[in-house]
Image (cartoon, rainbow, N blue to C red):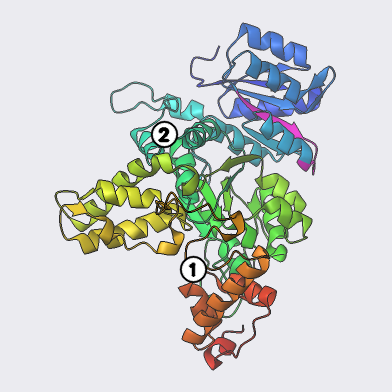
Amino acid sequence: MNPTANHRLLVVDDEPDLRTLYELTLVREGYDVDCAGTVEEAWAALQAQRFAVVITDMRLPDGTGLDLLRRMDEHGRREKGIVITAYGSAENAVEALKAGAYDYLTKPVDLRQFRSVVATALGRAPAPVGEPPGPTPRERDAAPDARGAHARPAPFEASPAAAAALRRLVGDSSAMRQVRSLVERVARGMAPVLVHGESGTGKELVARAIHEVSPRAGQHFIAVNCGAIPEALLEAEFFGYRKGAFTGANEDRQGFFQAAHGGTLFLDEIGEMPLSMQSKLLRVIQERAVRPVGSTAELPVNVRIVSATHKDLAAEVAAGRFRQDLFYRLNVIQIPVPPLRERLQDLGAICQAVIERIAGDAGVTPVPELTAGAMALLQRYAFPGNVRELENLLHRALALSGGARIEREDLALPDELLHDAEPEPAPASTPAPPLSAAMAPGQPPLPSDLAAHLDQVEREILERALERHRYNRTAAGASLGLSLRQMRYRMARLGIGGSETAAERGDGF
């Protein structure tokens, strides 16, 4: 065994030429390498030796690389697996990631990408885009550190920041325990993650936790709201551009992928991305390279993709609004985030954490407390805006209370969104009314067509917002928390017309 090598790797491939190519590439990087040609040979090598990474071809004479990964998992092996699949085989790549592979490569294998994926699996940050790679493990080992010993990269361990990231996912309900468990399990790999949940549930908090628990925590976390970028600017924003590529491009500029190189790219509201951009995103994910606008050369990027949406992407695929192949690429692992109304047992802990943060930011001491009456009122609230709405309510209540206690009057919750109110006891002599008449005085009758009723309510809200903002759809949508694209979609669905302001027409909408 080479005394200067950091890691021992196992390469599994039945083609001698490819096996030799991979072995030479890794040996030049300073690794110790063993080779095998079949699943059984690889398993025998694993029985005799511990490895840091196992790199296996998908198709082998006596099985598949997935068979080897599953056997490793069944026996509690801790080696990270990298699977090499046939070019363009999205199904195999997704299957490999679901089977527990750390990452995958497609044939013909790009050796620069090969080295980068292995380095990332071993916890070594890749060189920034456009810069030469750093020293090999052998070269780093040969360089003495300040104490005169040979420097060796420490194995990845959960940091205090990682523990803090998990603590920010507040709650002890079974749903939140499952979320934290999934975050810890998926953080160590490269498999794309899709975080699904209603608006305001904390999807970005989950994405940040995945990044901060992962070995990429020291690199950049880049969050992008896909619904907030004008369609004409999407390609330049995501992939960057070269000086002179278009009017106003006075200098080279990195895109989101280059900025996230070595770290995590969070694609929020991925369901809002137009189809034309979806195909470009799919190519980048497959090729692991971006071509800036105005450039003829591609730049390799090493990025972990985490996406989030409140939409049912499977339904969007069925409706032709989202590419099926991109959906399969992004939805390798799904983490559902429950709405607040389904985990009200966490409400007390969430309120305490939010109030402490708000009071700390405002310099308020001592930290105000929610009274029992205020908490009881919150327990009856529907929270259509989830945790984000709760934060806004507590912000306002803290400002209105002006003391050490937050009373129920400080919350100012709308009565129509409260439930489980105590009913007035009926006189003993009064017979119970029939079910169709069992309503409190003054309550409107239940709608016979709920969908049509909700459409009418939404139409009235949109029309009021448009009138208030002089039919400027951008401003009206922003006042309701909607992007222009979302506003236009809802107006078209509900048949709402309106005059555009001159300023809005000038924006090209």
Q: Secondary structure at mark 1?
A: loop
Depth check: 364 or 253 in front?
364
Of badges 2 and 1, nearer the viewer stands: 2
Label 2, on which residue?
172
Q: Residue at x 29, y 63 (%)?
A: 396
Q: Which residue is mark 1?
A: 481
Q: How many marks?
A: 2
Which image quarter holds the N terminus?
Answer: top right
Q: Nearer the viewer, residue 208 or 339?
A: 339
Find the magenta span and give its range.
80-90
Magenta-drawn stretch contains 245: no
Could you say whether the residue bearing mark 2 is in a helix, strand or loop? loop
- Which residue is at 65% across, 51% downward? 289
Q: On the picture, is 72 further left or further right than 364?
A: right
Q: Residue furthest bottom?
A: 502
Q: Is residue 131 visible?
A: no
Which kind of residue does numbered mark 2 sit on? Answer: Asp
User: Is 332 on the left-hand or right-hand side of 341?
Assistant: right
